Amino acid sequence: MPSIYIETFGCQMNESDSQHIAERAIAAGYRVAAAPEEANVVVLNTCTVRDNAERRAYGRMNHLNALKRANPSVRLVVTGCLAEQDRDRMRRRAPHVDAIFGTRELAQLGDQLAAWEPNFADLDFSDDRLLVEPLGGTADGVAGAFSMLRAFVTVQRGCSYYCTFCIVPHVRGRFDHRRDADIVDETRSRVDAGAREVCLVGQTVNAWRDPVSGADFGDLCRNVASTTGVERLSFISPHPKDFTDKVLDDLAEIVALNPRIHLPLQSASDPMLRRMNRKYTLAHFDSIVAKIRQRMPHAAITTDLIVGFPGETEDDFCATLAYVRSGVFANAFSFIYSIRRGTPAAHWEQVPREVALDRFGRLIDVQNAVTRAYHERYVGTTRRVLICGDSKKDARRLAAKAPDNVTVVADKPADYPQALHIENHPYASTPWLDVAVEHAHVWGCTGRIVGRAARYDAPAEPVMQPLLDLTVTR
């Protein structure tokens, strides 16, 4: 059976697209490989939202050329936003790439995989492939014991808002909304396949409108939550201007909705918000925060922030710093402004790099203190969290995610199977862990697993406490 390796850069929309590519490949007769050197087809799903993501993608293309040299039958495919933007440039910079598919060409990518499949059916990897050093990377679409527990469902593609720093409308096009019925059907199929938590994905997800009925995002979430059997529902990434009172009222009534609202601010300076074309003021943004607090008082509000945007003064930055220091955000994804070819801000006078770096460091310090304080609220409580698998830093521990997206890590119970990819894993049927939280950190919390449950709202059964290893120190 031929194999495909998929590696994803960027946002949840790309993760959703990679999920779709993996499913099309499996339907065409491929298995999903865990490493590029094991694959007949290697797919890079790329991002261009920041310069670093673009440079990493081109570097990875050149890195993977070793596979082509060792075995010319390997097919290297690039898709995603960078492929949409840089199609001609990519052919010059990476001529070893076999196929390039833009963000609106996933169907054609699937057709190409099906066309290639017979050529790989009886093909063995060449001996030269064995000489290739391990190429690293993180595979997407590989079936694991817990991979089915979470699923992305795309509700909308593209964006029509044209923020002056953002390349998305240029590489993914204007708003394109899926029908409510199609979204519900896909969500139900994900739940039937084992998903306990479904994330609705769109570039500006709460601007969604049903193209037939005109139903809004609140209607959609209520429909998905009430008709599909999903245990937990989340969404990413909204725009502040599209949180109407009606949408917020609808969200507040959904019992299955995760208590986390991502609300991208970008800057707390009104002059910067105007230059960014964000379509709201700080006062408007703060009123949305107040409305969320009124309706969902326990919800964590997270955000995106940009430092060093063209024209940002020290006063502009200090406005952002002061708002963050007020403690409004449980967490923030903060970035130094990155020039994007094809956007208006790329042509404006830039903030000196050393100034941007200094501001970035100051912002991170303030938000980290706020985030740690938020996590400290967990200490002394027992939180129900959804298992992810082994902790990336310590395989003796399990990592999980709380409904408000906080990472929780705990020692494996004594009854936890040691096999990495055991079929019918007992913790896959009881994936909700009750963790007694003992310590808070900037990145999340640690504690002790005291129970596990079959459903989010089901009673927990006890677990065997970890065996004490006197030879290990931490």
Image (cartoon, helix red, strand yellow):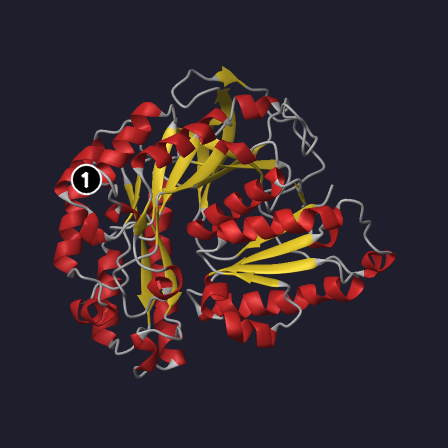
Q: In x, y percent, where is residue 145?
A: 60, 31
Asked if 453 appears above or below 344 in the picture, the reply is above
Q: Nearer the viewer, residue 279 or 115?
A: 115
Residue pictured at 28% horizontal, 29% vertical: 223
- Image height of 177 relative to 356, above or below: above
Instruction: Tell me the SS state at disc 1.
Output: helix
Could one spot residue 151 in this view of the protein? yes
The quadrant the C terminus occupies is top right
Residue 201, picture quadrant? top left
Dot 1 crowding, Cα within 10 Å, few <14, some 14–19, many 20+: some
For image coordinates 55% across by 36% down, the residue present is 147
What is the three-letter code of the residue carrying label 1?
Val
Q: Which residue is mark 1?
A: 247
Q: Residue at x 21, y 74 (%)?
A: 315
| For residue 456, side relative to residue 83 (left or right) | left
Percent position of residue 281, x then y: 15, 61
Horizontal and vertical percent position of residue 256:
32, 28
